[in-house]
Amino acid sequence: MNWKQILFFSCLAAFVLLVGMYEQGVIKRATKSRDELNVETRQMLAADEHRREYFEEQRNEFENFVEEERDEQDERSREQIEQWRQYHYDGLYPPYIYNSHHI
């Protein structure tokens, strides 16, 4: 026998075997039941909720960090300005707090 004939008959035999198994119901497409779909949906929704809570917590922590940093920077700026004013105060006029001009 030629190698092409051997290959052809082996493929034909495999095809006939698969068609027979499909007709008998051995090879079925696995479909999920309604309960399995509901369970998967609930799991996905729970995972989404956990992810949302995690990112919300991370965002809140970052906002708190930024607010604290801004407050510290403002305090340092106020202290530096006050030190500059005290250093350059010549004593001729009342201190800046009492001599503030509103524009």
Image (tube, rainbow, N blue to C red):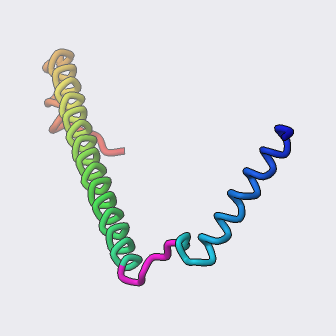
On the picture, is 64 further left or further right than 47? Answer: left
Give how far across and how far down residue 64 sits, in percent: 22, 47
On the picture, is 43 further left or further right than 30? Answer: left
Q: Nearer the viewer, residue 70 or 42?
A: 42
Q: Nearer the viewer, residue 13 or 40?
A: 13
Classify residue 24 by image quadrant: bottom right
Name above or below for residue 41 compared with residue 13.
below
Give how far across and how far down residue 38 sits, in percent: 37, 79
Question: Magenta segment: does it hold 7?
Answer: no
Q: Nearer the viewer, residue 36 or 92?
A: 36
Classify residue 100 by image quadrant: top left
Name above or below for residue 100 compared with residue 28.
above
Which residue is drawn at the image coordinates 35% and 63% (left, top)? 48
Residue farthest front in this picture: 1
Which residue is drawn at the image coordinates 17% and 15% (left, top)? 87
Q: Quadrant of the C terminus?
A: top left
Classify residue 74 by image quadrant: top left
On the picture, is 67 further left or further right than 103? Answer: left
Which residue is drawn at the image coordinates 36% and 82% (left, top)? 35
Identify the main secondary structure in magenta: loop
Give how far across and how far down residue 1 sits, in percent: 84, 40
Give, as a single range, the part of the protein colored magenta.
Answer: 29-35
Question: Magenta segment: does it hold 31?
Answer: yes
